Amino acid sequence: MRRKKVTQRRKPLILVTNDDGITAPGIRALAEEMHQLGEVVVVAPDSPQSGMGHAITIASPLRLEPVDLFGNIEAYQCSGTPVDCVKLAVDKILPRKPDLCVSGINHGTNSSINVIYSGTISAAMEAAIEGIPAIGFSHLDYSFQADLTLARRVAYLLAKQVLQHGLPEHILLNVNIPNVPLSRFQGIRICRQAVARWEEEFAERIDPRGKKYYWLTGRFVNYDPGDDTDEWALQHGYASVVPVQYDLTAHHAIAYLASNWKLDGLPKTTRTTQ
Amino acid sequence: MRRKKVTQRRKPLILVTNDDGITAPGIRALAEEMHQLGEVVVVAPDSPQSGMGHAITIASPLRLEPVDLFGNIEAYQCSGTPVDCVKLAVDKILPRKPDLCVSGINHGTNSSINVIYSGTISAAMEAAIEGIPAIGFSHLDYSFQADLTLARRVAYLLAKQVLQHGLPEHILLNVNIPNVPLSRFQGIRICRQAVARWEEEFAERIDPRGKKYYWLTGRFVNYDPGDDTDEWALQHGYASVVPVQYDLTAHHAIAYLASNWKLDGLPKTTRTTQ
C-alpha cells in the first residue's frame, strides 16, 4: 500500500487576542508560540479589559490602530472589548476566516464560574460562534511577572491538537494552567466546570468629598467535591481543559417546566401601558 | 379531611434590575407588576448598559444613590453594570436574600444567541449563581414607546409561577415577548435556544480629523429550522421561555476529547519565559 503523498498546504492563519490588553506579557508569549505553528495576526484591546465578559460596544464607535510590538508579527490595538476585537478582526483585518483563534494567556484564573465573567473566554467564544476553532488560555498567577514557561508549552500542544483534529461543532476550550514549576506538572486533564461561586463583600469607603463608594472584593468558594472538575485538576498540578458550549439551554429542565407549570391564559387584569 | 390552615407568610422580596438603565419604561412596568406580588426593591444602572454581557467592574469603584422614581417603591441607581447592580443589591441594600430577581423588561430581543451579549440576562444569571430564582424579560420592540401591555402580563404570570414553584437548581429563565397585540398572542412556550448568530459588518467612517472609526452593525441569521426553538415561538406569536444554565461545560464533548486527543507529555522545546 502506498502512502498518500502529503500535499503542500498553506500555513494555518491564527488570530491571537486577550483581555489584559495588548501590552500584557501573556499575549506576547502566546503570539510567539503560535508563530511556530502558523501565520499570526494579533488584535487585542488597547487597555486592560478584565471582567468584561461577553460585552460588546454598541453605543460608541471603535478605533483600530496597527502597532509594532511583536517583531515580525502583524498586530493591531482596538479601543473595544475582547469580543469587539474578534468581530473587527474577522470583518476588517484578516484576509480569510482564521483556522484558529487563541485568547490569553490570561494573567489569572478563568476556571469554574470565572468562565462567565472572563473577557478572555468570551473572545474565544465569539470566535466559536463565528465557526472558528477557539481556545482561551489562563495562568493561575495574576502577576505580569509570572513564569509562563509551562503555560507556553501547554498552549503550543493544545493549539497543535486543534489545528490537527479541529473541535466538535459549537465547542471552544477553556484551558487553565496551574502555578507550578515544570518539574511538578502532572499533565493535562479534560474536565467539567466545577460548581463554585464568588461570595461578594464590597469594601465601602468615603471619598474626599464625603461620599460613599464601593470596591468589588470577594472570596471564591468551591462547593464541588468532584475529582472530574477543573478546580480539582488545578489543585493537583494538572492543566484543566473544559469543553465549553454557548448553547445555554438547560435541556433537562424543558420537560420539567412544560409538565409542572400552568402557562395557559394570561392574568385577567386591566393593566395596560401606553 | 380538614384543610390545612394557610399560615401567614411575609411578602416575597423581589429585586428588580435591567440593562437599559433606571429611566427606561421597561423597568417601570416590571417594578409595577412585581409590586402586585411582593415587596419590591429596584437597583439598576444609572445609564444604558446594553450589550454589557456578564461584565463586572473590577478596576474602578462603584457609586450607589437612592432615587425617587417609582412612587412608593424603594429604588437605587448604580454606576456599574447590570451584574454589579445585583451584587451590590445583595451585599449592601437588601435586608435578606430576595425570593426572586427579575431583570428587564428589556427594550429589544434577547432570544437565541443574544442571550450571550445581554446585560439583562446576565443580571438574572448573577442572581441565579447566588441562589436566587431569577427571570430575564425582553420585548421584541426596541422602542421606548413600545406597548408593554402583553409583556407586563407575561411577566406577572411567570413571576407568580416562580414564586409558587421555585426553579430547578442552577437554572434561570430567559423570557422573550413577541411584538403582537394581545388579541394575536398565542400563549407561552417552553423552548430551547435557537442556533443562530450575528453576521457582522462594521460600518467604516472618517472622523473630522481624518481618522477611521467603526460602528458595529450586523444581520441576525437563524440557522435553526426546529419548531421547538425560541425563534420559532416568537415568529408564531408565542412568548418564549428558555431555561438557561451557567454550567457551560459541553458534557458530551468530554469523552470525545479524552479518547481522541493525545495529551501526554509536553513539547520538548527549550522555550522559556522569564
Image (tube, coloured by chain):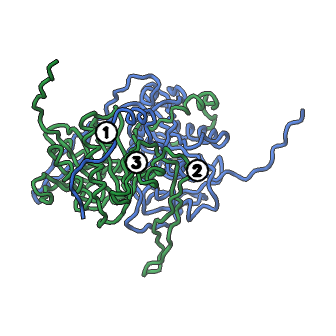
Chain colours: A blue, B green
Query: Marks 2 and 3, Cα distance to the nearest angstrom?
Result: 26 Å
Task: Give the x, y percent position of residue B9.
Answer: 12, 33
User: Residue B25, located in which quarter of the rendered image?
Assistant: bottom left
Q: Mark 3 falls within which chain? A: B
Residue ID at (66%, 39%): A165
The residue tagged 3 is: B240
Residue A2 is left or right of residue B141, and the answer is right
Dot 2 alpha-carbon crowd within 10 angstroms: few under 14, some 14 to 19, many 20 or more: some
Tell me which amino acid carries mark 1. Ala
The residue tagged 2 is: A131
Q: Are marks 2 and 1 on the same chain?
A: no
Q: Nearer the viewer, mark 2 or mark 3?
A: 3
In front of the other: B262 or A96: A96
In front of the other: A2 or A270: A270
The residue tagged 1 is: B128
Tell me which amino acid carries mark 3. Ser
Tell me which amino acid carries mark 2. Gly
In front of the other: A83 or B147: B147
Q: Are marks 2 and 3 on the same chain?
A: no
